[in-house]
């Protein structure tokens, strides 16, 4: 069975490609390397010992998408390709709306043309905005607070409308919480450019000496140690969730959203402490003022995914930190042929 993966060289996409190949699927992968590197494709194949078909392309090129669908008998799509930095989306909203929405519209139009109605969509917990209560369920109000989150929320609405127009569609929108970690091989992981937006890459770059210290935004929240609490999920657990979601959409119709998280929250200081244990490095940090819009506590209720998809997160924060540190210390090495 052939599955098209858009954005398959990215952080979440590449790890999902590994899980999909290991599960026996034939993969056609699209990426334009706007937020990834070409050698990731080779590393995916090295890890799995299997090959995939790759196209360097953008979903903004509708003719190219049409060509790919005409060249392959595609059964389903996992759609990752999107810009994803919250801060950048605030600075460049039009770029985010154009890329994230038009890419998805082009993809869905070509899928409909070729009668491919099975779709797993990479959404985000940012669609919830500032929740009224935790843990967050799929029934919590959707009220994104930035352009990136708005593109995810708008796309979910587009997909709902698509199903209403044609009940043959089967769509799973996966709302991720905080993916961290790396593949246990150390060959693929999160590789942000500039100062990382996410906590663990930031911590690991401080530990490796790439950055002088970690900025902690607020230590006066109403939590046990004053720092914000988030639901961190190992990237390989998240990747396995996509395999389970694909299995689900292949045998159902409709549109459903699923939270992918551990259901547990960990503070910034807790993550620093565990990373120091793993790396044997001291993490220097500086306390800054809270950022506008940041909240004290955010974690998932993943019970729907546990029950419907038969999926659950297996790895704890020690393993998340250990695999991140292995990736950080090995990522600069040349790929062994």
Image: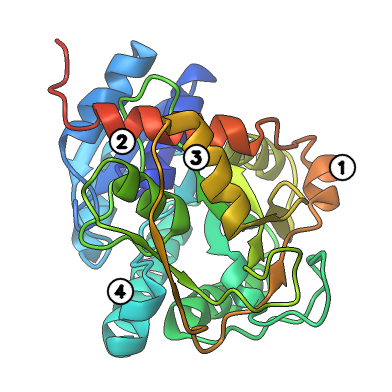
**Residue where numbered disc 2 is placed:** 328
Residue 275, disc:
3
Earlier in the chain: of badge 3 and badge 1, it is 3
Q: Is residue 306 above or below residue 50?
A: below
**Residue where numbered disc 1 is placed:** 307
Looking at the image, residue 235 sits to the left or right of residue 38; the answer is right
| Residue 101 image-quadrant placement | bottom left
Mark 1 neighbour density, 10 Å: few (under 14) some (14–19) many (20 or more) = few
Residue 259, disc:
none
Examine the rendering and report whether any part of residue 313 can be seen.
yes
Viewer-closest of 55 and 46: 46
Q: CA distance from mark 3 to mark 1?
A: 32 Å
Tell me what residue is drawn at x 82 percent, y 69 percent: 134
Residue 170 picture location, percent across and down: 66, 53
Q: CA distance from mark 3 to mark 4?
A: 35 Å
| Residue 320 image-quadrant placement | top right
């Amino acid at each position: 069975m052939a599955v098209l993966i858009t954005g398959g060289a990215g952080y979440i996409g590449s790890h999902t490609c590994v899980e999909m190949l290991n599960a026996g699927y034939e993969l056609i992968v699209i990426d334009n390397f706007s937020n990834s590197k070409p050698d990731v494709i080779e590393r995916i194949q090295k890890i799995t010992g299997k090959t995939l078909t790759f196209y360097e392309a953008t979903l903004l090129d509708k003719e190219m998408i049409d060509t790919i669908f005409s060249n392959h008998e595609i059964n389903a799509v996992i759609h990752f390709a999107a810009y994803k930095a919250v801060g950048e989306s605030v600075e460049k909203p039009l770029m985010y709306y154009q890329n994230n929405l038009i890419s998805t519209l082009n993809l869905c139009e070509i899928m409909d043309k070729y009668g491919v109605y099975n779709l797993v969509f990479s959404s985000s917990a940012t669609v919830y905005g500032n929740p009224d209560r935790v843990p967050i369920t799929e029934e919590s109000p959707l009220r994104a607070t930035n352009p990136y989150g708005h593109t995810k929320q708008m796309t979910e609405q587009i997909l709902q409308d698509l199903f209403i127009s044609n009940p043959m569609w089967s769509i799973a929108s996966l709302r991720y919480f905080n993916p961290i970690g790396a593949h246990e091989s150390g060959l693929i992981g999160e590789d942000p450019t500039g100062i990382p937006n996410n906590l663990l890459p930031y911590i690991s770059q401080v530990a490796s000496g790439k950055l002088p210290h970690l900025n902690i935004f607020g230590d006066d929240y109403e939590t046990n140690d004053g720092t914000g609490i988030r639901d961190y999920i190992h990237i390989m657990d998240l990747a396995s969730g996509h395999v389970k979601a694909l299995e689900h959409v292949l045998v159902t119709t409709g549109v459903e959203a699923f939270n992918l998280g551990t259901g547990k929250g960990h503070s910034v200081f807790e993550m620093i402490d565990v990373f120091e244990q793993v790396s044997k490095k001291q993490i220097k940090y500086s306390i800054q003022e809270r950022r506008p819009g940041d909240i004290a506590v955010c974690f998932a209720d993943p019970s729907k995914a546990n029950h419907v998809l038969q999926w659950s997160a297996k790895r704890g924060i020690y393993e998340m930190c250990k695999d991140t540190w292995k990736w950080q210390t090995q990522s600069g090495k040349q790929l062994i042929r």
